Image (cartoon, rainbow, N blue to C red):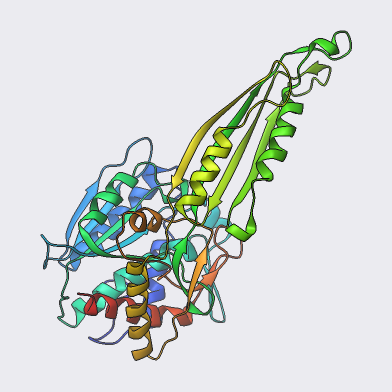
Amino acid sequence: MLPGSTQEAGRIDTEALLAGIREWVEIETPSTDAVAVNTLVALVASQFACLGMDVQRVAGRDGRGDHLLARSPWGQGKPGILVLGHLDTVWPIGTLARRPLRLEADKAFGPGTYDMKAGDYVGFAAYRHLVDQGKTTPLAVTFLFVSDEEVGSPTSRELIEEIARRSRYVLVMEPGRPAGAVVTSRKAIAKFVVTIKGVAAHAGVAHEQGRSAVVELAHQILCLEALTDHARGITVSVGVIAGGNKGFSNVVPEHAEAYVDCRAVDATGMEHLVRSVKGLSPKGRDVTVTVTGGVTRPAFERTSGVAALYDHAREVARELGQDLPEVATGGGSDGNFTAALGIPTLDGLGAVGAGAHAEHEHILLSSLRPRVELVSRLMETLE
């Protein structure tokens, strides 16, 4: 019996689910370590294969791990259900030695528990729950677990969009939100680097001949931050700055740069931001301003298709005796890509908890069985 298997057909056991999640969590998978990620990919691939699924590993590139596809043996060849997740985490190798998985009342703490190995496992267990009962589903079920979501999905986006275009629905196993809420919209995200070129000079002998890149960058930062409009759901954050010659304050700096994060609730707002950032112009004399970058995740908007999928999920949850509120969030996921293609997408179906990317990251054990039941019933009822 696989770790985490239901002990008998039709029964979902929380302790068994935790055992399966523990096995995945205790294989560390930082996005930057392809060998480490592929260790977990191999394990998950073997577990999917034990369920009779057609399993394919798509080779990673640019130092990233492989992406994992697993398809149900029925219903292929027509649009079905895509279950989407990621196996990489933000935590470096060695984090578990310092912060091993531990239980405290209803909470299981550990790196990668909440974001998002428990969610991945919930999707796996939901499908296995059907197999254990000898059931199939009206639509084919395809899992895609990628290896680079935490670094922006640079090598998996094309694959995600390819599979999504052949799908009728997308269920994203990102973490569930407080009170068990699912996610029905996410902001668009853009990343930019603003580079300033000034004129160097001796700060004491020829200060008037210099053109400070740091001063110019200060003006540009004020312009950038002024683009924030909370009422419209638009935010601009200058998160990292650098400039000058470290250790030499007696030089008028000729170089400075800033890394900028931009977010907007819809495509229109993001188009405005992109034009504004790329349209930055110098405030001082004899300096240049160069902007590189662009949109990294399109907006996940609450379209009629998303609303209809959510309404269906809420009714399924009600039949199971569960509440299923919805939320919008400023954080991105691979669901941004699928929703932007017009594919009805429901996000945040993973385990409920808190602390993504933080030391107190944890899941609520009490959320595991209800989430498995919900996702399993969605697989059964979506047509």
**Quadrant of image for the C terminus:** bottom left
Left or right of 281, for residue 8: left
Tell whether 116 sits left or right of 191. Answer: left
How many numbered circles are shown?
0
Judge whether 57 appears above or below 129 on screen.
Answer: above
Q: In which quarter of the image is residue 141?
A: bottom left
> In the image, what residue occupies the spot 45% across and 64% down?
185
Q: Can residue 292 be seen in this view?
A: yes
Q: Could you tell me residue 44's position as x and y percent?
A: 29, 60
Observer-nearest residue: 324 or 235? 235
Quadrant of the drawing holding the N terminus: bottom left
Residue at 39%, 62% (x, y): give it: 24
Image height of 80 relative to 11, above or below = above
Instruction: Name the outermost residue toward the right.
Output: 204
Q: Which of 14 and 177 is in front in this view?
A: 177
Residue 222 in percent (x, y) is at 72, 39
Q: Is 151 above or below relative to 202?
A: below
Residue 1 in view, yes or no: no
Q: Residue, x 40% and y 67% (percent of image)?
A: 119
Give coordinates of residue 190: x percent, y percent: 51, 44
| Side of 221 relative to 175 (left or right) | right
Rendered residue at 35%/45% (across/down): 65
Residue 138, percent from left and from top? 15, 75
